[in-house]
Amino acid sequence: MAAAGIAAVGSVAPAGAQARGEGPSLHEVATAAAASCYGSAKSYRSDSYDNGWFWYGSVYPTTTSNCDDINLKPTNGRITVRTCFLPSGGNGYCNGWRTIDDDTWGTAATEVRNGTKFYLNFSGPSTGLVAY
């Protein structure tokens, strides 16, 4: 007689279950990476300068291994933003404008190489969090 709580031989594991010893699921890895990235977020406030709105702090920020992307979470309304890069070996350039909803993490730039200096250009005044 089989003991209570022991699955019958040949039973099928529920969808999404993992075999013992396989390690974390892809979802768990992605969730941990996002937590690590967003956990390193810094506050920002865009300032008006030369007919535009910019954020770069007291020095240009440099991307880190904390995040693969430059992520933004505006906290005072929906915003349109572009990322401008200052590569060490050439002229600076900016990517296209991206719209990010209020109080939602959005991507200002994707797959940015670690150690890249950048600044953010906004369509208007904005405050919130930036993770890079």
Image: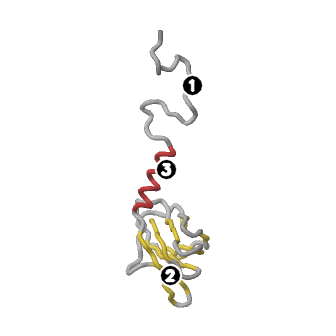
- Within 10 Å of disc 1 (Cα), the crowding (few <14, some 14-19, many 20+) is few
- Residue under circle 1? 12
- Residue 51 in the image, given as x and y percentages of width and height: 56, 90
Disc number placed over residue 104 in the picture, else none: none
Return the x and y of residue 99 as percentages of the image width and height. Answer: 61, 70
Circle 3 is placed at which residue position?
30
Could you tell me which residue is drawn at 54 percent across and 82 percent down?
125
Q: Mark 1: which amino acid? A: Val
Judge depth for marks 1 and 2 and give the one in front.
1
Label 1 SS: loop
Q: Mark 3 falls on what kind of element?
A: helix
In the rendered image, residue 113, in percent from the top left (x then y), is placed at 46, 63
Percent of width and height locating residue 16: 55, 36
With 54 as the anchor, is 61 left or right in this view?
left
Residue 56 occupies quadrant = bottom left
The answer to which image quadrant residue 132 occupies is: bottom left
Q: Is residue 48 depicted above or below 99 in this figure? A: below
Q: Nearer the viewer, residue 26 or 91?
A: 26
Looking at the image, tell me whether mark 2 or mark 3 is earlier in sequence order: 3
Q: Which residue lies most toward the top here?
A: 1
CB contact under 8 Å: marks 1 and 3: no
Q: CA distance from mark 2 to mark 3?
A: 30 Å
How far separated are the C-alphas under marks 1 and 3?
26 Å
Numbered circle sitting on residue 54: 2
Q: Tag 2: Cα neighbours inside 10 Å, few (<14), some, or many (≥20)?
A: many
Query: Distance between the Cα atoms at labels 1 and 2?
Result: 56 Å
Q: What kind of residue is marked 2?
A: Phe
